[in-house]
Image: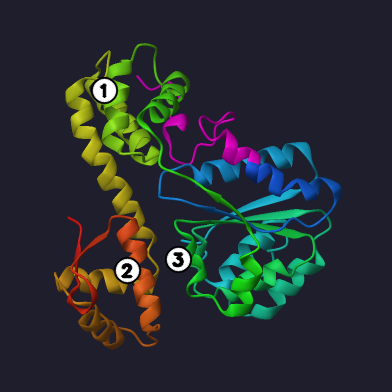
Amino acid sequence: MIVDPRPLEPAFVPGDVRHREGEVDALTSSLDPLLDGRHADPALLTGPSGTGKTCIARHVGDRLQRETDATVQYVNCWDAYTRYKTLYRLLEGIGEAYDVHRQSTPRDSLLDRLRENLDTPYVAILDEVDQLEEKGVLYDLHRTRGLSVVLIANAEEALYAPLEERVASRLKTAHHIRFDRYGVDELVAILEDRVRWGLREDAITNEQLRWVADAAAGDARVAIGTLRAAAEAADREGAARITDAMLREAAPEAKSKIRQQSLEKLTPHQRVVYDLITERDGVRPDALYEAYREAVDEPRAERTLRNYLRKMRRYNLVTAEGEGKARRYSTVE
């Protein structure tokens, strides 16, 4: 059934993208100054999960590296959520992290080393950038000659709200590229490509692909995950084709897997908050913050907690009912 598993993976970056030509052109244009050796202003990609932001950023970055002498480094801020980790990943991109040691290398020296070793244009793609706990690093990167940044976040306010004014004022000049949810026809076209590249011919019908696209509600990750889970089920059973029953079982499985992956990416403080919500189902925000303050040694500000909650709601980890002080949070089963 599966002839090539790579196109069925969420991190797969196709050589040709569907239904995001305008966004590709916009991001490419924002990076055009690099072709003349000039600095490119920041680009900000926003939109709901599963709308192609990461795919497009990496697609444009791959093409830029093929056609120019620019270096492009992708950094997922779910993992690299501190200043140190972000700078370390950027040093890795130019081969300058080999002798950096967490315990003995001064933090401030990482930025100096980065600035001293940028001989060609460097593009930093910072995905889930609102996850950064020390957002002042964005100001430092913006002021680094030869380095341009592409920022990816779910929502503009999620990035700007917690920023210091000096950082926000710099980043508000960014080229803002907004991504809307995919329509059913657009998702079907994307799935058709993945089927052609990854599955045996006639593995699934167009009508079935339309069902998958409709069930995914505009989220390409869910659609591709459903296709992958159904194809794996067909492989296990030795079936010649994917059946409707396999798809019906695969859809909730795909959503659950994505939710679990998001849960595993939470920072230590976010995980504490999530666990407290799990323990205190229906907890109010004020009670949640007090419990959080007691549970950690260096609690973040209440505004940061609100940002955590917004993030977890966008990734379908928690739900909220009510408004203001009457709001209550619960985890998604």
- Does 47 sit above or below residue 129? above
Amino acid found under the numbered disc labelled 3: Ala
Q: In the orientation shown, which residue stands out farthest toward the left?
A: 281
Coordinates of residue 300 in the picture (x, y in percent): 40, 82
- Inter-mark Cα distance, 2 to 1: 38 Å
Residue at x 70% of width, y 67% of height: 142
In the displayed structure image, the side of residue 198 where residue 37 appears, left or right = right
Query: Nearer the viewer's eye, disc 2 or disc 3?
Result: 3
Query: Nearer the viewer's eye, disc 3 or disc 1?
Result: 3
User: Which numbered marker is on residue 309?
Assistant: 2
Report if residue 182 is visible in the image.
Answer: yes
Residue indicated by mark 1 = 234
Label 2 Cα neighbours within 10 Å, binned few <14 / some 14-19 / many ≥20: many
- Splitting the image into 4 quarters, where does residue 225 fall? top left
Q: What element carries label 2?
A: helix
User: Which numbered marker is on residue 46?
Assistant: none
Stretch in magenta: 1-25
Report if residue 204 is visible in the image.
Answer: no
Residue at x 35% of width, y 52% of height: 261
Evaluate if marks 2 and 3 touch, with contact meaning CB atoms under 8 Å apart. Answer: no
Label 3 Cα neighbours within 10 Å, binned few <14 / some 14-19 / many ≥20: some
Q: Which of marks 2 and 3 is nearer the N terminus?
A: 3
Residue indicated by mark 3 = 158
